[in-house]
Image (cartoon, grey):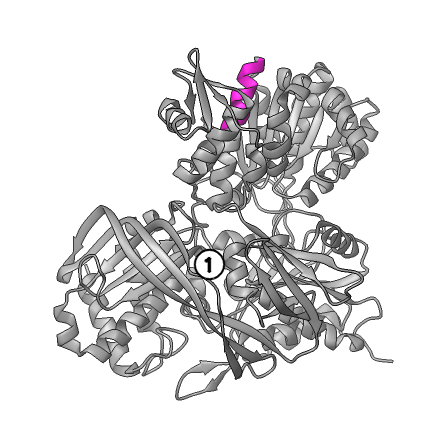
Amino acid sequence: MKIRQSMDDLLAMLKEDPNVVHWHTIPERRALSVPFPESLDWRLRRTLVERGIDSLYTHQAQAFRDACRGEDVVLVTPTASGKTLCYNLPVLQSILSDPSCRALYLFPTKALAQDQKNEMESVIDALDVPVKSYTYDGDTSGSIRQKIRRAGQIVMTNPDMLHASILPHHTKWVSLFENLRYIVIDELHTYRGVFGSHVANVMRRLERICGYYGSRPQFICTSATIDNPREHAEALTGRRMTLIDRNGAPSVRKHFLLYNPPVVNQPLNVREDELPAVRRLAARFLKNGIQTIVFARSRLKVELIASHLQEINTGFDERAKICAYRGGYLPLERRKIEKGLRDGKIMGVVSTNALELGVDIGQLQVCIITGYPGNMASVWQQAGRAGRRQEDAVIIMVASSTPLDQYMVAHPDYFFSRKPEEARINPDNLMILMDHIKCSAYELPFKKGDTFGGQPAGDLCTFLADEDVLHYETGKWYWMSDAFPAGDVSLRSAVQDSFAIVDVTDRGHVKVIGQMDRFGAITMLYEDAIYIHQGKQYHVDRLDLEERKAYVRRVDVNYYTDSDLAVQLDVLETDEHGVMPAQVEKGFGDVSVRALPTVFKKIRFETLENIGWGHIHLPELEMHTNAAWISFSEDDIGRFGKDVFQGALMGLSYLLRHAAPLFVMCDQADLSVVPKIKAPHNEKPTVFLYDKYPGGIGLSQKVYESLPELLAKAREMVESCGCESGCPSCIGLVNEGRQAKHALIRLLKEARPER
């Protein structure tokens, strides 16, 4: 019988591992507690004591006081700091004093709502008071829905359900909207980008309806740490917020390791891919019965890691089931995985950021992060999934060979001292705003002089009336179509398109196994692609663009596929322009982007070698969006030579793609970078960074504002890399490598000279 190694044994082995380049221990933190507020209802006081809580953390007490004073509150504390009590206590207090009071809880996912419902029910049972609390989502049966609409005092739902089901049918929810006292928005930091821009408009619609029924509810928002919590909460809700950011909760000791895979090609400074290192580390903990979560940045990497761990599962504990978890899985499958983690039947899970949120998934002790997630808020959210009970937590971030990852592991002081990034939304994105004006007009007609989001709504309503979408009569704009507008508006994307993934392996039992947006479909579900789901490979037989369906068939192959895009970009209008030293220009404005998938590569799982390729036959995608750009002088081409300068421009694009998330809270997938040796709008060598969403969501605007600092950071990254000729850790593997690298350093010095 094999003897298991303890956590201490495994930590001792890691201390001897030369690839652990930094070991950062975060000491345990003692609680800062205060007695219960005198105004706290005696029944709540008794219930808390019965549950082993004889005082409140300082932030919980402050949240209770501020909410009871009628203030709109945003609370920002780390994971596992007891944020739930910060809104449950004032909500229950108001219902105990006035049973007609209502509260609406919004969670970004159904899983989180179900998790919080279980917590609330245990409190209500202990209170022994008939408070009616329900979840209202797509799984709620018709008979229960009637009961919730009539008598639900606490309604827990998600923004999608509020948008598509509750607000359009507000006349069935009169009791809720007439008596709505609190709106709770949990995991505020998740409402950024397109999703956050949509949700801000849903809040505008919600406030219109509340005003119609005579209520003005308070907001209580909670968030993981971001750099602009008050500003973000105010942009999302349209209210002035009181900020609570002094954490009083305790935390366990955490060992945070930075792990850099070894260099496998010294001349090119090429490191081992991060995936094998992640698999080795995860297997080491799993084989010893230590429950582990692995985070990876893409769906493909999640499936590759899970597939490998499942293959070597025979050496694990008999209950050590390994699962993948990501967007695109059906809800029932995800709920089953969450339950398996809580009860210990699943020992390991490999996830995208879908499990960053505060769903209770058991007593995980180890978190392995595959590459820098792109922002520090995600780093600490993912790290917080381990050590949520009493034991020490172990967090290992395994660096990829990208410039940003290599910079982080080479500068641990910078990594551990970085503030979380800002969350950014653009509720006034015209495409998004118009969608919600339509939805709001369906719910309540607009009158002359009405505002939406603080701006006059008349011009937009007039435009929609000219398009025969609204009808103007006796001073009001009415919805005039038979269609149901909210049903055609997805909060998760700016383009309302979703493709179903249909498994046709068994012709007698065809089933939908997932879904994907249009952009993902053309880059991952083209014909002859290999689509991976729960570690299993599926061959894409057909992509039906009209019906929005991809038909896939189960296969057993030892490769996956990756597509290439050809991108054409044109500037439509310049909104901002500036000149930096050395005749370097910067700009921001509206652009047209045309993307055409051209070919795909077949890449072997283990060796990552290219074993074949094929053509992709799909139409071009076009969108209008926002971009920031930096243009160099045409003289620089002659100064360095065309080939060398082109290599430097490609290297700069590679650097900026990885460095931009340092200045904007976004994923690398939210921003695209395109270099042009001769941009059509000014005929100069230019690098564009554009929002990958129609109309833009404010990311490239922030990039434009931060360009001097971004270029300084890019220079620091390329100068700190020890390679001679350019490598994946700085400018990538470009032609004219050594000369291109030195040319880029010179260009960056001239554009941003030392002060």
Please state the horizontal and vertical placement of residue 477, each as a whole percent of the image.
45, 19
| Mark 1 lies on residue | 669
In terms of secondary structure, where does tag 1 sit? helix
Residue toward you, 740 or 137:
137
As rendered, which of 51 and 73 lies closer to the eye? 73
**Number of numbered discs on residues:** 1
Residue closer to the observer: 672 or 656: 672
For residue 209: magenta?
Answer: yes
> Is 89 placed above or below 710 here?
above
Residue 461 position within the rendered picture, expressed as x and y whole percent measured from the top left: 41, 25
Q: Nearer the viewer, residue 106 or 382?
A: 106
- In percent of width and height, residue 630 lies at 24, 59
Quadrant of the rendered structure where residue 432 is? top left
Check the image and report above or below for 255 versus 217: below
Which quadrant is the N terminus positioned in? bottom right
The vertical placement of 536 against 108, above or below, is below
Q: Is residue 160 left or right of residue 739?
A: right
Residue 384 visible: no
- Predominant secondary structure, magenta span: helix
Instruction: Place residue 725 in its image quadrant.
Output: bottom left
Left or right position of 660 against 444: left
Q: Residues within 10 Å of mark 1 (few under 14, many from 20)?
A: few
The magenta span reads 204-213
Name the side, left or right, on which 108 lies relative to 9: left
The C terminus lies in quadrant: bottom left
Question: Residue sitting at 54 percent across and 49 percent down?
Answer: 497
Name the kind of residue labelled 1 in the image: Ala
User: Where is residue 77 drawn, in percent x and y?
Assistant: 56, 42
User: Residue drawn at (42%, 66%), measured in percent from left and top?
Assistant: 404
**Is residue 579 within the magenta segment?**
no
